[in-house]
Amino acid sequence: MFILFFLIWVIFNGQLTLEIAAFGVVIAGVMYWFFCKFFNYSPRYDLFLCKKAPLLIQYILTLVWEILKANLTVFRMIYSAEYELEPAVVHFKTDLHSTLARVLLANSITLTPGTITVALTDNEYTVHCLDKELAEGISSSVFVDLLRKLEEE
């Protein structure tokens, strides 16, 4: 978080000089202290994020890839004259433990074209799919596997 604050300082200044860097270190340090003191932020969380950075990057890249694939699939479904869309509402449960992982899964499903997470109650998801074909394998998707790995410590 400290590095993020420092980078934001440098970007807003538009240049990097010794004076700007010195002030940036002090201001980033004060902001970091403020976050730790008043928002219950912990340096351990920074270490956790650094440790999980490769998985987070893999998750983001996978999300982008799945969005692109779903865009093409939905495009073919909509513009295909012989294809008859059959919307479906799917209910499924996951074994994800953290609220963050469950919300990330719900948002990833919604970001993927053709699917919308309608409800999330505890571990139960309700997802509306443009076609029943898009609902296949949604409960055991690549997103669930990656989020399970992210939850492991």
Image: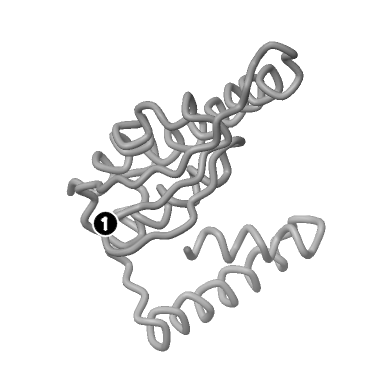
Please state if 64 lies on the left or on the right of 119 as rendered.
Answer: right
Residue 43, image quadrant: bottom left
**Residue labelled with disc 1:** 123
Position in image of residue 138 (x %, y %): 37, 34
Task: Identify the residue at horizontal 42%, vertical 52% (top origin).
Answer: 104
Q: Secondary structure at mark 1?
A: loop
Percent from the top left, x then y, of residue 50? 36, 48
137 to the left or right of 58:
left
Closer-to-camera residue (143/83): 83
Residue 152 drawn at (x, y percent):
19, 46
Q: Residue furthest bottom?
A: 38
Q: What residue is drawn where x is 26% and y is 56%?
A: 123
Query: Closer to the camera, 134 or 27?
Result: 134
Q: Is residue 132 above or below residue 8?
A: above
Q: Nearer the viewer, residue 89 or 20?
A: 89
**Residue sitting at the far top:** 82
* Residue drawn at point x = 82 percent, y = 58 percent: 14
Name which residue lies at 43% across and 36% down. 59
Give the percent coordinates (x, y) of residue 151.
24, 49
